[in-house]
Image: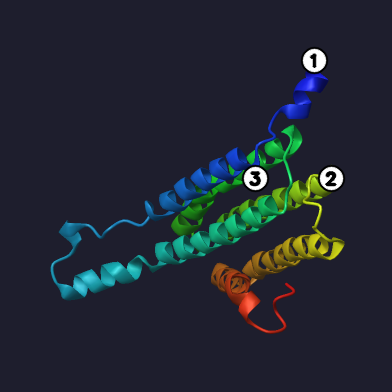
């Protein structure tokens, strides 16, 4: 009975995509809740308000960075789902684990925003990104092994999907390692990586990444 159940459980790509969209939407919305309007009692003039807004920079930067992170991984997941002919129980659970990492992003972002000069906070944030990449890669490898891909998906396309994830994770790891200098160097490096992945398809020579 269990073997037969596993043959048809988790087979809906549409439901998986819908759930993913919902989790991403909630996670991306929760990010901004950590950015608070300056307290009224501390603002007595235009100068006070400008200073209070400047102090929000340490929270705005992680928010923008994480919004881009989730956007990149949403595009990556949707790209994979669009190349699948079907799903199965095992693939569904791999993507559920991926969504677990997505749901953790607001926490790791808030931690980084609160302790932006602490290397531990930066490493926790990077581990969140690592989990996202590793699970997305695992889902694709499993789908390919289980022959869940569309018939027209070539080996070159599959290799491009895998290469994009691996190269990105290598760059993110390099960015995390740069916290040996300071966390702001790491954040700057990660933002540059994200901008590359957001606009690379429009730049000649970078579209293969």
75 or 123, nearer to the observer:
75
The quarter of the picture where the C terminus appears is bottom right
Q: Position of residue 199 (x, y in %)?
A: 59, 75
87 vs 112: above or below = above
- Mark 3 → mark 1, Cα distance in angstroms: 28 Å
- Mark 2 → mark 3, Cα distance in angstroms: 20 Å
Q: Which mark is residue 147?
A: 2
Say whether disc 1 or disc 2 marks the residue closer to the N-terminus. Answer: 1
Element under disc 3: helix
Q: Residue furthest top?
A: 1
The quarter of the picture where the N terminus appears is top right
For image coordinates 57% across by 48% down, the residue present is 102
According to the picture, the residue beneath numbered tag 3 turns out to be 98
Q: Residues within 10 Å of mark 1 (few under 14, many from 20)?
A: few
Dots 2 and 3: beta carbons under 8 Å?
A: no
For image coordinates 49% across by 60% down, the residue present is 67
For image coordinates 44% across by 56% down, the residue present is 114
Residue 2 lies in quadrant: top right
Q: Is residue 190 left or right of residue 153?
A: left
Say whether disc 2 or disc 3 marks the residue closer to the N-terminus. Answer: 3
Q: Position of residue 124 (x, y in %)?
A: 60, 52
Q: Which mark is residue 1?
A: 1
Element under disc 2: loop
Say whether disc 3 or disc 1 marks the residue closer to the N-terminus. Answer: 1
164 vs 50: above or below = above
Q: Residues within 10 Å of mark 3 (few under 14, many from 20)?
A: many
For image coordinates 29% across by 68% down, the residue present is 53
Q: Is residue 148 left or right of residue 196?
A: right
In this view, the mark in front (2 or 3): 2
């Amino acid at each position: 009975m269990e073997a037969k159940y596993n043959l048809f459980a988790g087979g809906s790509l549409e439901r998986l995509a819908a759930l993913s969209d919902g989790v991403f939407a909630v996670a991306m919305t929760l990010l901004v809740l950590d950015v608070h309007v300056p307290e009224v009692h501390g603002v007595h003039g235009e100068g006070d308000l400008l200073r209070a807004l400047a102090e929000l920079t340490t929270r705005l930067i992680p928010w923008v960075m994480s919004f881009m992170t989730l956007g990149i991984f949403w595009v990556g997941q949707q790209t994979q789902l669009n190349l699948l002919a079907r799903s199965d129980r095992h693939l569904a659970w791999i993507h559920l684990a991926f969504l677990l990492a997505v749901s953790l992003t607001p926490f790791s972002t808030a931690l980084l925003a609160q302790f932006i000069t602490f290397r531990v906070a930066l490493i926790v944030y990077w581990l969140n990104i690592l989990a996202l990449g590793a699970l997305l890669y695992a889902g694709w490898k499993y789908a390919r092994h289980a022959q869940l891909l569309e018939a027209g998906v070539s080996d070159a396309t599959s290799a491009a999907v895998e290469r994009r994830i691996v190269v990105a994770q290598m760059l993110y790891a390099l960015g995390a390692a740069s916290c040996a200098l300071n966390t702001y160097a790491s954040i700057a490096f990660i933002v540059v990586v994200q901008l590359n992945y957001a606009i690379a398809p429009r730049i000649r020579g970078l579209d293969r990444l």
